[in-house]
Image (spheres, rainbow, N blue to C red):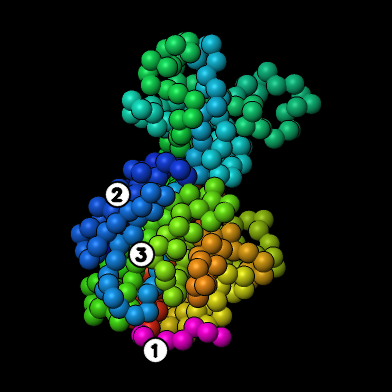
Amino acid sequence: MNDHSLGFLKRLLNTPGPSGFETAAARVWRDEASTFADQVEKDVSGNTWALLGEGGAPRVMLAGHIDEIGLMLTHIDDEGFLYLEGIGGWDPQVMVGQRVRLLTREGEIVGVIGKKPIHLIKPDERDKASKLTDLWIDVGAKTREEAEKRGIRVGDPGVLDTQLIQLGDDLIASRSIDNRIGAFVVLEALRLLDAGERPAAQVAAVATAQEEIGHSGGGARTAAFRLDPQVAIVVDVTFATDAPGLEKKELGDHRLGGGPVLSRGSAAHPIVFEKLAAVADREKIPYTIAASPRFSSTDADAIYLSRAGVATGIVSVPNRYMHSPNEIVSLTDLERAAQLIAAFVRSLDATTDFVP
């Protein structure tokens, strides 16, 4: 990955943007898109899209969600301690002892997540998993009034305060990888399409909002309705099964550095899957296949049912330690995913038929 794209990725992952509060991360994405896209727009739902080749055919939507899991303040007690609920799906065990960054009306405030010390936990309770209700946030305030004077209010969102680090030459660890790297990949694919011969298609790369809490489709539903694509590629993460204790018989064999993962079934259109696989074979891009017999748990579940239906494919990046403060992915996998998507888009023209 070149230095420019790596710098953009670092800015994107380091910027807080939990579901429903994606504004700052979306602004980073928009600023980068504005350096090469024909048009960059945003909507009331928090989505941002960058467009190439308006009026081309077919209309293509490339979607990766810009939000991340986070937390929200639910109560401030008289001693100034803050209580929290998760935004998205958390394992509370990974939150214990972490630093947090709260997004308040007065700016960002750093705190730590507290829990009763092990010495004070009764022996018969020590083996029990922590719940979010057992935890609190300490920002150093002595009273509720002091916390409120610093701009803290119930409903303020936050994220765990971790930054991107590189592990060797090819791996990175960060919070927000799920799935801000999807938003990164679709914009990198658009950059590749702009750098070479323009495709026949009209292509919109979309950083969608609220996927982690979007039980009715999140921002992907409204973005797909507005853009009215004929074909869509959704980029998300999937479980890397090269870590201890994971069952390949259930999840498949997906390794960091092994290339993108193509989904079959559910919201993954069969013609789009076959075209993606054929392009990957032609371009000598390694990939693996994931079975998705019921639902994909990605933006694809909303997009493929938009309007009269959208032929949708799912390209995933293997991810270790999903929904933790230090998710790990391969930079090579990110590059290959963008290259595959760009090559797929170049293979389309106005005569491409997605009716099975």
Q: Amino acid at mark 1?
A: Thr
Dots 2, 3 in contact, CB < 8 A = no
Instruction: Say which of marks 1 and 3 sits in front.
Output: 1
Q: Is residue 250 left or right of residue 340?
A: right
Please name the residue shown 46% across and 86% down the image. Answer: 353
For residue 28, the mark is 2
User: Closer to the camera: disc 2 or disc 3?
Assistant: 3
Whether residue 23 sits left or right of residue 314 in the image: it is left
- Return the residue nearer the eye: 263 or 310: 310
Identity, as a three-letter code, of the amino acid under mark 3: Ala
Q: Which residue is mark 3?
A: 205
Q: Tell me the quarter of the image containing the N terminus.
A: bottom left
Disc nearer the start of the sequence (2/3): 2
Q: Which mark is residue 351?
A: 1
Q: Residue drawn at (44%, 75%), measured in percent from left and top?
A: 230
Residue at the spot x=23%, y=80% of the render?
Answer: 197
Compared to residue 16, the image places residue 31 above or below, namely below
Q: Which element is circle 1 on?
A: loop
Q: x%, y% of residue 113?
A: 52, 27
Of the image marks 1 and 3, the number of the one nearer the N terminus: 3
Can you give x and y, in whole percent of width and height, for residue 233 in the image? 45, 70
Q: CA distance from mark 2 to mark 3?
A: 14 Å
Q: CA distance from mark 1 to mark 3?
A: 22 Å
Mark 3 packing: few (<14 Cα in 10 Å), some, or many (20+)? Answer: many
**x and y, in percent, of residue 125 in the image:** 75, 27
The reply to whether residue 13 is in sight is no
Whether residue 347 appears in magenta in the rendering, the answer is no
Q: Which residues are magenta?
A: 349-356
Q: CA distance from mark 2 to mark 1?
A: 36 Å
Viewer-nearest residue: 111 or 300: 300
Q: Residues within 10 Å of mark 2 (few under 14, many from 20)?
A: some
Residue type (three-letter) at the residue carrying disc 2: Val
